[in-house]
Amino acid sequence: MSKARSGGLTEESPRPTTEQDQSEETLSRDETFEMLSNRRRRYALHCLQDTAEPVTLSDLAEQVAAWENDSTVAELSASERKTVYTSLQQFHLPKMDDTGVVEFDDRAGEVALTDAAADLDIYLEVVERYDIPWSFYYIGFSAIGVTLVTLSWLGVGPFAAVPYVGWTVFLLAALLVSSVSHYLLTRRMRLGRGDTPPEVRDG
């Protein structure tokens, strides 16, 4: 086997990893948001994260169609299967393949997650119409806590009936309960956890 000139690369030598190569192996924030902006792609990603083996395009399309139509695979109509199958094959999976999230073999009809997708830890915060996001909840909780402790410390009205130390202990206990609840909800709402996507469970 011939070799290149001294100081160069031989045919057996691996190509050095450059900063550009490393950036291509990692999803950017824009790419991640773009990928997750579509519900069908989120469902496909959830389904793929549930298995370490490649999934056939047919099986993937059937499961995604079942979630979209709030149905089961057995109850799907031929048109529902075909619509999702065609959409995944011609648009969504090639787009996810270009991003580096999945490896899509159109000829074999198989799809598998890449290492880049395995590093994704996606949490979907689904907020109902009259609910508030957790970030607003913690801001409000902190503001109320500071107000109660300050009024008690200053001896203002009925707030002084409870020592400011008592208010502090109460607020810390309430914060602990809130934090545990938030942690459990976050685990439940992670993409790829559970049999169905978070949007289907809480839809």
Image (cartoon, helix red, strand yellow):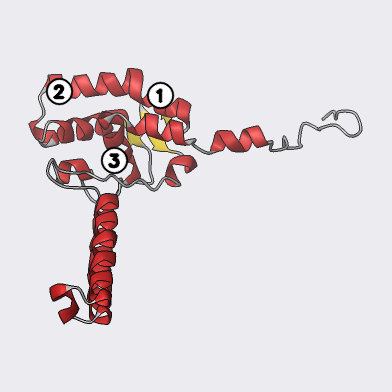
Q: CA distance from mark 3 to mark 1?
A: 17 Å
Kind of residue indicated by mark 2: Glu
Dot 3 or dot 2: first in sequence order is 3
Judged left or right of residue 123, residue 30 is: right
Q: Secondary structure at mark 3?
A: helix
Residue identified by numbered label 1? 95
Q: Are marks 3 and 1 in contact (CB under 8 Å)?
A: no
Q: Are marks 3 and 2 in contact (CB under 8 Å)?
A: no
**Residue 11 horizontal/vertical position (percent):** 77, 31
Kind of residue indicated by mark 3: Cys
Q: Which mark is residue 80?
A: 2
Q: Secondary structure at mark 1?
A: helix
User: Which image quarter holds the N terminus?
Assistant: top right
Judged left or right of residue 177, residue 28 is: right
Residue identified by numbered label 3? 47
Q: Are marks 2 and 1 in contact (CB under 8 Å)?
A: no
